[in-house]
Amino acid sequence: MDSDYGVPRELSEVQKKRALYQPEVPPCLQGTTVRVEYGDAAIAADPAGAHVISQAFPHTYGQPLAHFLRKTAVVPDAKVISEHPAVRVGIVFCGRQSPGGHNVVWGLYEAIKAHNQSSKLIGFLGGSDGLLAQKTLEITDDVLSSYKNQGGYDMLGRTKDQIRTKEQVNGAMASCQALKLDALVIIGGVTSNTDAAQLAETFAKAKCATKVVGVPVTLNGDLKNQFVETTVGFDTICKVNSQLISNVCTDALSAEKYYYFIRLMGRKASHVALECTLQSHPNMVILGEEVAASKLTIFDITKQICDAVQARADKDKNHGVILIPEGLVESIPELYALLQEIHGLHGRGVSAENISSQLSPWASALFEFLPPFIRKQLLLHPESDDSAQLSQIETEKLLAQLVETEMNRRLKEGTYKGKKFNAICHFFGYQARGALPSKFDCDYAYASSCSFFFSYKANCLWVINHVGCWFQVLGHVCYHIIAAGLNGYMATVTNLKSPVNKWRCGAAPISSMMTVKRWSRGPSATQIGKPAVHMASVDLKGKAYELLRQSSSSFLLEDIYRNPGPLQFEGPGADSKPISLCVEDQDYMGRIKKLQEYLEKVKSIVKPGCSQDVLKAALSAMASVTETLNIMTSSSPGQTQLS
Amino acid sequence: MDSDYGVPRELSEVQKKRALYQPEVPPCLQGTTVRVEYGDAAIAADPAGAHVISQAFPHTYGQPLAHFLRKTAVVPDAKVISEHPAVRVGIVFCGRQSPGGHNVVWGLYEAIKAHNQSSKLIGFLGGSDGLLAQKTLEITDDVLSSYKNQGGYDMLGRTKDQIRTKEQVNGAMASCQALKLDALVIIGGVTSNTDAAQLAETFAKAKCATKVVGVPVTLNGDLKNQFVETTVGFDTICKVNSQLISNVCTDALSAEKYYYFIRLMGRKASHVALECTLQSHPNMVILGEEVAASKLTIFDITKQICDAVQARADKDKNHGVILIPEGLVESIPELYALLQEIHGLHGRGVSAENISSQLSPWASALFEFLPPFIRKQLLLHPESDDSAQLSQIETEKLLAQLVETEMNRRLKEGTYKGKKFNAICHFFGYQARGALPSKFDCDYAYASSCSFFFSYKANCLWVINHVGCWFQVLGHVCYHIIAAGLNGYMATVTNLKSPVNKWRCGAAPISSMMTVKRWSRGPSATQIGKPAVHMASVDLKGKAYELLRQSSSSFLLEDIYRNPGPLQFEGPGADSKPISLCVEDQDYMGRIKKLQEYLEKVKSIVKPGCSQDVLKAALSAMASVTETLNIMTSSSPGQTQLS
């Protein structure tokens, strides 16, 4: 027998109630008609990389942004088509499970069925493996029934492999052609969306009819850029983890004798750790981005924690809670360099047992200094994206041990007079990844996948658009634009900090989210010069980090722990959103739209025949604007992501 | 400055809503009058130990059970007293924090203030340390405001020390006298309630006026006997852990490549592991009680798990979730024996570094076989109750390693043909212990502490009763019985599986819950012959275990994982209770009451003057009942707890 994917699950009371929840949809998707407006061609934020990207993606770079709007006026040349061909759309979970993934499938299903009951949504089983092997499951009401608003990826399963080699890309194309797919929807994070863009480009070049689109789903929250405010799953993960961190804080405060070192899943960036800190107010968090920016060594970090323990002991506090992102180990310069050497040796086929003897003298010295458990973990084979197996490296234990040794030394020396230092270590990750998605993630996933669950009216025109879903659009002008085959887009829902009725739906070309790495070392040096959607680090100039910085000393010394409580689906807390999302004033898509309106307004005021004064005023003002922007954009290569 | 105990906390939205929740109280406590009925003198369930117990507790053994009932009739000699002296009651958290502890304080506070606003509830800070050092905090509305229905013990703090040595007991008595306490309420588990009984006895003997009473609060759920159905905190811990286990199950099913080994906090008995299994349906659970009963060695257990992995691989399942109670290590005969040797050496003052060289040959051989990480953990100093530091011993890692080694061997040999075995280990404990208490625990704690929150009416008689709280009782007969100073009781709320309006409130002498160990080895041999409230093991003949046994093969092979969802305070799931509590048909107190009624009925029917036939029928029937019971009770020494 094969796997258990897609079999109906027995649901608990809470799950049954959740299964009945109908996600809220933004107003632009509620009516019977949606207006699609196209903006200018989207460019990459990194001007220095734009040329490389445009060369790598000749068919899919430079496509326009799309905004989906509420129908506001009758468009004169709207054409009514009442017959719509059935379409076939494939969907695949790529990368690690993230709460809300199932709702992407559900939303998409509702949208395509609303268009034509004969349309089919085909799920690939076991992620990219299933895509290549054409292992499929047709999504039906029955299949969906026990997965609506539920966690995990067990409806379809997943692998974490990439779709990157020529063989893999061709295999994917062969599957799409064999299954006669009109569109392929890829659910995943930075790596999978890079793959989606690459597939879209390759398909376009090969004149494969399948359009490829991506949906930003990853618990790490690191797919974040001008078009994407947050990812599906991040909210749930942070809520579940914050609850547990808060419980541990309460525990620390009750027992008054332990220091808890908690490592959080979230890959290289520290978004989860930052958000959980803002939600639960632990005493300390060591963000990878801070460590990298200040080039702190493992000893600097140890000293920082020891000094904090000592400062707290002076206030008679012998307990505490310290958060550590799992990516920290790659942010500590000497450990990162050691990892790079190890991975390089792996790449050259050296077996794990023999690696330690082939390290450079300095790397070998560091390696020998580390406790045995962590040596073994550092020797693990790197992931498919060349990064270390972060979930397996117990940095929290390493730090706890180093801190303990140092505190014992200080105690002996008499420079520390508090109680004996006691540490308890935790890794919070797997226990959150399969959680029931929060309301926010349910809504966001549903709206993302098919911004588009509005009831189908047969007398309107529907076309498959670039997010792989169906939009009811007015007029065959739009029809032609869309049917022309926009491809390589990512579904975007923005202004997420506002209530659902203010959300903006749209789509942006994935290639415009790419950057080009110009430096790298170790095995990942092969990525140099290749455009990719890179993970976004925590912005140390951003508002969320600012909020942390303002409170960090009171978090450290005053124990103002905050307990958001367990994830609630009703009552207070049920509608809360990530704090970092709410303080970061994003809404890039909204502003792009607003700018367009200003430019149109200027054009409409300053028409030939307007007064000399009006024209002069416009010229003067626009000259100044243009000059300012020129200066700003010519000095921007610093924005390139170097990591 | 001193600790942060009792300072007002900033509450989150969810916490604020919880703080407003008014626990439900059973009807018997709702009226303005409560009737107290006394049953027969309570005896110990273990007849063989009864003599020893009665000798050890001459002042407090053999006291009657008390039932609190709704006022059903006007009692003719009720006397109205409108003046009540103010009382002073002390309260102390003993042992580890358990969700709901704060509600015991709140309930008690409401009860004593309802009686006389000048009465005082005095909390001891930092547990038994605070009791001995007379560090106190007077409980007020202000102090309580941010702790109602909240988790942790941070309002008062705790230690986990016992109050057992002569010095400690005398210190406690000195504090109670210095603070002029009318009653001392001890919140805790088996150990702390044993201490409470001992204090009660000592105080009585020394004619100290303070009455000592216990409240059963422990997350372990192992204070369980004919009078106590479950403990405060058990429900919350099981719900929080089951949620996490379920998330991990969903994760396993999504990724299809990991085996998760999850160790659960809960001390020596496996109640938490059993309940979590019934709630979340993982593939396997290794109950300590099963292992002890079957005398399984660590290799037997490893083989059992390996066979399960293999059976699952045959069905193409390469993932799974296995629960392990933290007490398992003490249930495995050879590991227990090793621990006993180690603790014996600790007791003789041998330092941890030197212990391994002084072990007996066989223990030494086993010790050397074990991986270094677990050796270090086994060498930790035992707890104050002589048991191993269960929370620190990573049995799950030991088992995962042994299983991995064996599966690799089988893979090489070709007897196992599944995917490479991958294990991920977790310990769930600290992250649940500080959780917001469930509705059930809020209600149970509140009702337990002061079964007695009914509005105070000045025209009724209130007396301090043996559970350290105030009851409004009818008639000065009761007044004299209670005021005579019943002491050494535990508050009991029974029939808990039914809705709150069916709960029965009462009190039972702690000494009647005691048993006497007749065998033991190692350092705990000093406990031989001393009566104590011992932890209850999972009853392998009980209904909860039966339920597990019925489902275990489908749990193992069919992945019928169940996700109860996160702890909810509203909507479905909010009112759920432990499954083991609901299937175990307890209500011992209710049956004792019912029996009394039958006996009374017989007496009232068969009065002098009744017919010869009625008398003969009664005699015949009663003779048969008496004979049956004689046979049953004379063969019961097997019930003595030996562990």
Image (cartoon, coloured by chain):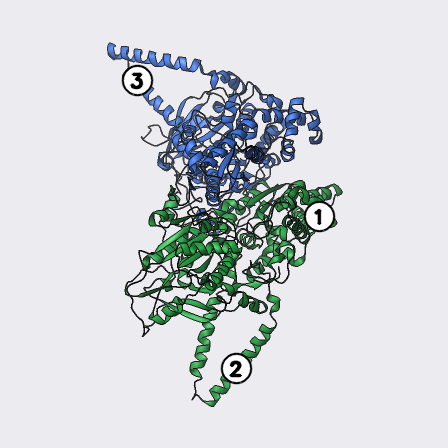
Chain colours: A blue, B green
Amino acid type, residue under disc 1 in the picture: Leu
Q: Nearer the viewer, mark 1 or mark 2?
A: 1
Q: Closer to the camera, A49 or A447?
A: A49
Q: Which residue is mark 3?
A: A602
Residue B607 x %, y %:
43, 85
Same chain shared by disc 2 and disc 3: no
Amino acid type, residue under disc 3 in the picture: Val
**Quadrant position of residue A34:** top left
Q: Tag 1, which secondary structure?
A: loop
Q: Chain of mark 1?
A: B
Q: Nearer the viewer, mark 1 or mark 3?
A: 1
Residue B422 x %, y %:
64, 40
Q: Tag 2, which secondary structure?
A: helix
Q: Residues within 10 Å of mark 3 (few under 14, many from 20)?
A: few
Is residue B164 in sight in this rendering?
no
Residue B91 x %, y %:
42, 54
Same chain shared by disc 1 and disc 3: no
Q: Closer to the camera, A603 or A417?
A: A417
**Quadrant position of residue A278:** top left
Q: Which residue is mark 1?
A: B359
Compared with B383, A85 (above or below) is: above
Residue B423 x %, y %:
63, 42
CA separation, marks 1 and 3? 90 Å
Compared with B506, B252 (above or below) is: above
In the rendered picture of this protein, how many numbered marks are placed on residues? 3
Is residue B240 in sight in this rendering?
yes
Q: Which residue is mark 2?
A: B621
Q: Chain of mark 2?
A: B
Which residue is at the far right?
B413
